[in-house]
Amino acid sequence: MDAVEAVGLEKRYGKKVEALRGVDLSVRKGEVFGLVGPNGAGKTTLIKALVGSLRPSGGRARVLGLDPLRDRPELRRRIGYMPQSPVLYDDLPALENVEFFGAAHGVPNLRGRAREALRFVELEERAKDPVHTLSGGMKNRVSLACALVHEPEMLFLDEPTAGVDPRLRSRFWAAFRELARGGATLFISTHLMDEATLCDRVAVLRQGRVVVSDSPREILRRGRTRLRVREGEREEERLIGGRPEDLAEALRGYGLRGSVSAVSVEADSLEQVVLSIIGEEAG
Amino acid sequence: MRRTLIVGGRVLRQLRRNPRFLVLSIVGPLVIVYFLKLFFDTFPEGFDTGRYAVPAAAFIVHFMAFLLCAIALVQERTAGTMERMFVNGFRRAEVIGGYVLGYLGLATLQAAVALGEVLWLFELDYDADALAALFAVVWLLAIASVMLGIFVSTFARREGQVFPFVPLIILPSVFLSGFLVDVDELPGWAGWLGHAFPMLYANNVIQEMIEPGGALADVWTNFAVLAGYGAALLALASLTLREIE
């Protein structure tokens, strides 16, 4: 059984606005699934439909085998949800926010577990500070701690890294991987394409429809590579397929040994370059 | 019940961490009652100020408790914490019950302070039974006002949308409750409409209890209606509060 199954999921607001136009997707248990799309693509609407806080206009969805609306008491025990932008009680300390959402689930040893969740997001030392005194990135981390305090089987994170600097973003992704290693399934929305490559599988959402759903590697294979070769004064440019085999084939004409069957080149993303520069400066 | 207490505890902790809000919501009624005193001092001697001052104190508590609770709940919706509570498994009745518990303390304090100041400033002297009945009815009105605030908040999606309800709910309370105008002098439909507002029942009790020889036995049904009014609003609010968009 898949962790999430959605078939023809629709959401209309009035007659004109169609936020979701028949979304089909499946998420396997234990994977880090990315929902990628520009702002206004319907990512938040889809997440709200899956966590049972929005009634779809059509289609059906199953999360952990449960109907998000009919079975919501059980579903809500088993999932964690981090809304877009940190939704917290600003005047309460970070720890009390985490405890409040944990208490809803009857978490045993609540104080200890809430502290553990804050330790996981590296904010234990700010546990007693009111949320309004924390930076935007710290609030995001408190919000994540609130979503995982009851150790849910599945986490829905709506743009958890929006407005977060590159260094913190990579810490977030390390945390997501750690949660996945612990057995949790993660459903993460983002409008950043480079984050999609960090997921096991992604669905690209555009204007309320899934345009493509696959592993990032498979999606990249469908792309084309622009090959430019300069030899003496002569420069040649052509488009080849995105697979490593296509590159090897193209280079054979320039004398690549016949025994080399695949060549792939992986350049750092802009984010990786910036991170390594920060790392060098830090010393 | 456990989760109702959790929400109530959180609302109380938030109130405690907002000293400015707390002070204003107590000082506000005090200042208004003082202005009321200045206003009544311009009246000729021998004017029965008690007939107006005590219901005016009740009205101030009614207004403040209604507005503060309505706005706090709408803020939960606009901030997204309401949705987050629901996705974390809190149910509608638990959220509403928690708010009632949280604001109960504040409403009690407001009732005691406003009534105490009116009695002191206007030098009103009632026997212990009358005083107990007056406090009880203002307190019950405050609770009904909290419920009314919760009920109204379920129709507003933003703080600004609460304000159109203020004159709609508050002004009829003044004019149709018998506190300024004798209800019997009003057209039949207006007198009937007055029964939809909790202030009418509170005023009935107050007018009876401040009369010499007033007996609680004559007005106890008003107590019952006021309590029923609060309970009915609570039930209605738990139907109108939307858990799913």
Image (cartoon, helix red, strand yellow):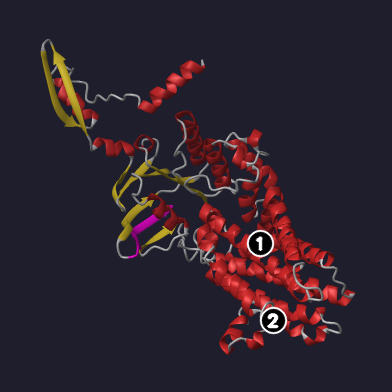
Identify which residue is drawn at 62% across, 36% down: A119
Q: CA distance from mark 1 to mark 2?
A: 23 Å
Q: Which mark is residue B98?
A: 1
| Crowd band around label 1 with a 10 angstrom C-alpha radius: few (<14), some (14–19), many (20+) | many
Give the overall secondary structure of the magenta segment: strand
The relative height of residue B30 versus residue B43 in the rendered view (above or below) is above
Specify the quadrant that holds the N terminus of chain B: bottom right
Is the residue A232 above or below the residue B155 in the image? above
In the image: residue B180, left or right of residue B137: left
User: What's the amino acid at mark 1?
Assistant: Gly
Task: Tell me the residue at 86%/82% (across/down).
Answer: B212
Mark 2 nearby-residue class (10 Å; few <14, some 14–19, many ≥20): some
Q: Quadrant of residue A274?
A: top left
Q: Chain of mark 1?
A: B
Mark 2 sits on what residue? B225
Residue B14 image label: none
x and y, in percent, of residue A132 in the image: 60, 41
Between A261 and A279, the one lying in front of the other is A279
Image coordinates for residue A201, horizontal then vertical, percent? 36, 42
Residue B82 visible, this orientation: no
Residue A68 or B43: which is nearer the viewer?
B43
